[in-house]
Every structure is written in C-alpha cells, then in structure tokens.
Image: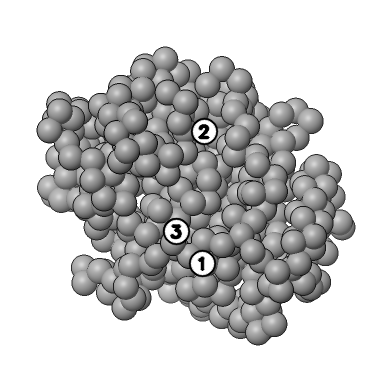
Amino acid sequence: MDLFTLSDIVKAIRKKEVSFKEVVNFYLKQIDKHNPSLNAFLRLNEKGLKKIDTFKPQGLLGGVPLGIKDMFCTKGLKTTAASKMLGDYVPPYSATVIERLEQAGAFILGKCNNDEFAMGSAGKNSHYGVTKNPWDLSCVAGGSSSGSASAVAAHLCAGALGTDTGGSIRLPAHYCNLVGIKPTYGRISRYGMISYASSLDQAGPLTHTVEDGALILDAITGYDPKDSTTADLAPTQFHKQLNSQVKGMKVAYFNVFQENEDIHPEILESQEKVLKVLKERGCELIEKKWPFLDYGASVYYLISTSEASSNLSRYDGVRYGFRSKKSPKDLKDFYGFNRSEGFGLEVKRRILMGTFCLSTGYYEEYFHKACQVRYLIQQEFMEIFKTCDAILCPVSTNTAPKVKEDVNILKNYLNDQFTVFANLTGLPALSLPVHLSKQNLPIGAQLIAPAFKEQNILNIAKSLEEELQLYKEKPDGF
Ligand code: GLN
C-alpha cells in the first residue's frame, strides 16, 4: 500500500480505491514484521478485528486504523497504563475520546506502550519494556507516548492518540518526525483517560501531517457533560479552515538558546531555518524574553507529582488494581504490599515526592509556592500574546537519546524544560518535523498559540510543512 497519510487513506476508502479490510491487513502485516523489534503495540483489539467484515467505514475518519496510548479506557479491551498495577484491568466503559473516534468511523487497532502512568520522557519506564525508535533502533522513541509515536512513524497504524501532561505528545513527535498536538486545556474531554496530573493532562494526536492531526482533533474536541473541565464549545472544524497563507502573522521567538550550552547545535540551526521560512512567507518575527525559563521544570515537577500522589492513591488493590500474594497482618500491610509490588520505581518516586510537597509544613513552601509561580508564568505568556499570534521555540535540547544512555534523573526531568510551559499555562502547542540531523535523526520545532487559537499554529505548521516536506521522509526499512 502506497498511501500513508491518514487523510489519503480516508479518501481512498471513500472512493473505493482501496477497501477497509485491505488497509487493516496492511497494518497487521507491518505490526507482525516490526512490532517485535519496536515494542510499540502492547496488544491488538482482537474483538474488533474479528468483526472487520461487518465494519462500516463511514464518517470523518471512515476506516482509519488508529493506535491508542494505553492511558485511555477502552471498553472490553485491557487498559494497563503500562503498569503492573493495572495489568489485568479491563474497563467496563470507553473514554469519551474513544467513543468519539469510533463515532467518526475510526477503527481502534490496538493499545500502544507508554511510560508507566505517563511518567517519563524516554519510554523506558514501561512495565512492559522500552519502545524503540524506527529512525534508529538503538534510540528511544521518546515518552511518555512512546508506542503511539513509534507505531505511527513505522507505519504500524495511520495515526495515534497520546496524552500530554508536560510534553508527552510533543517530545516523541520531535524524536520520530511526526506532528504532535497538545490542544488547549479543556478542549478535549479527560473522561476515561487515566489521570496523571489532572490540571495538566490533555489528549491529542500523533500523525504524519498537520491535516491528519486536525482531522483527529475535529473528531474528539467539544464539550463533554462527563468532564466538568471541558470548555462549553462545539467540536472544532480545524481541517476545513487549514490555510498555509500566513502572511502578516506575528510570531514571537526567544533568543535565549544561544547561551544554553546543553542545546544541540543542529537544534539551533533548525530554529534559524524555520525563522527564515516564516520570514519568506511574510510572517512578522518578534524577539521576546522567555518568561521564567529556569523555573518551568521545577514548577511542573512540584505540581505534577503532587497531583499524581493524590490521583494514584486510588490504586490500593481493594476494588481494582494489583493485589499481592503475600499475607498481610493488617490493613496498612495490605496497602503496602499491593502498592510496593504494583507500582514501578519512577511512579513510587513521584508519589513520595508529591506526598512530601503536600504534607503539613511543606505545603506552603513547595506546592503553594509552585502554584504562585505557575500563575506568574501564565500572566507573562498572556502578555506576550497581546502582540503575537504564536510563539516558536525548540521542543527539546537534543535528538532522541540512545536506549543504553544512562542519564541521571534530574537531567531526564530537564528534557521537558521547553514543553512544560504549555501545560502549566493550559495553552495549545504542537511539534512538527523541521529537520533531519547529520545522524539522520528527526528534529522538530514547537509552536505555541493563545488559548483556543489552535488554528493559528495549525496554519503556521501547515505552511512550514508545505515548504519543508519532511513528512515524506521515511525511516529506512519501514
Ligand atoms: N516527561 C514528563 C514527565 O515525566 C511529561 C510526561 C507527560 O507529558 N505525560 O512528567
């Protein structure tokens, strides 16, 4: 099959140039061949696959096979958050986004690997093993939406759904030559999405092109009575309004990176390249100072671990969750066994950190302080957007690291230093492919827009995509 963008597939099925079954079989073959080396899919939707003969490929996403991060509940299909804690969990209901994808005609092909409870940036924290990057199998695919990114990049599915709490869609998109979109907080329902840090979590697509991402968004956005944090807005129509004419748009950029010794020179070059294209296409470029750049990661890790410690307290092995075989002598023992055996190291580290931040005596000093700085960051971004339509910045300091590379925890946390701002502020942001390094590893660029102005950055990204055409590049052998 020569089609590989999601929109090409929808059109081809609609025109009967290819059948839905042929498309599914193409991806199943790809999975058979490549999943053993990538570890991108954790399991297939066997029940759904048994019914493909009667499946009706109609609607916006008619017949498109999608990979779903294992953080979304799928009715009757095991959902583990890549944790031993939920190793046997079969949800009795589907997340709102899954229902909406199905209503739009998408086919859920299977569940994708991720860092346990979406905590990580390399995909190495999954209980079910690391996911590899198809661009270089010795490198990670990025996290925490590792399997979703790897699967799309290697053409194991047409597009995928991820979650982004501090960069988990944008970072793997950057490492894998994909478009990854984190919409405005409140755009998409979180009902049925396993919580990591509720004030930061958002769902979003990973795809080859901007149009593909817009199509998935249009299927899943809009108010949901089951999630009181969704904005009272109708579903979006981004794909219809995509327009690569960006003349006159005002794009802010930051010049702080030249002084950052940790940033890869080719990332700096790629930013220059993007600025040049934007200028040629008539954008007005405005230099700004990045507000509180040094504080983003600290604020993010204080808030996200605090929220996580509270969210994850529900996994006690009583109604659901892993239950230890050891015999407890009392209730405390019972919880202790279940939780210490069920959670992995990084999750436990974060629960401890978060519990500490929220405890009496430290709450004011850590959690409360972090919330105050978060507010200041929000104000500063709003100030920037008084005169700009979008911000351009890097996604990360480097290309995909090696699987074997042993980085210290703090350095790992700093992988998100440029992405966490969109989550702390709730602003929409995306990552799109802009360069391939000398080592043939993908490099992305990040665009951030004012709240609910996703169309601004989708259009700018479309314009860059038209010029750079990087989505046409394929990793060798896939
Ligand atoms: N890497 C960040 C973390 O580990 C972000 C994760 C995410 O966005 N889910 O918290």
- Toward the viewer: 128 or 105? 105
Dot 1 or dot 3: first in sequence order is 3
* Residue at mark 2 to residue at mark 3: CA–CA distance: 21 Å
Query: Local crowd at mark 2 within 10 Å, few (<14), some, or many (≥20)?
Result: many
Judging by the rendered image, the residue that carries numbered circle 1 is: 454
For label 1, the SS is helix
Looking at numbered disc 2 in the image, what kind of residue is underneath it?
A: Ala
Tell me where residue 151 sits by quadrant: top left
State left or right for residue 63 relative to residue 429: left
Residue 331: x and y in percent read 18, 50
Q: CA distance from mark 2 to mark 1?
A: 23 Å
Say above or below: 444 vs 109: below
Q: Amino acid at mark 1?
A: Glu
Picture disc at residue 153: 2
Residue drawn at x 33%, y 58% is 220
Q: Label 3: which residue?
A: 239
Disc 3 residue type (three-letter): His
In the rendered image, residue 210, in percent from the top left (x then y), is placed at 53, 51
Where disc 3 sits, the SS reads helix
**Is residue 126 something that shows in the picture?**
no
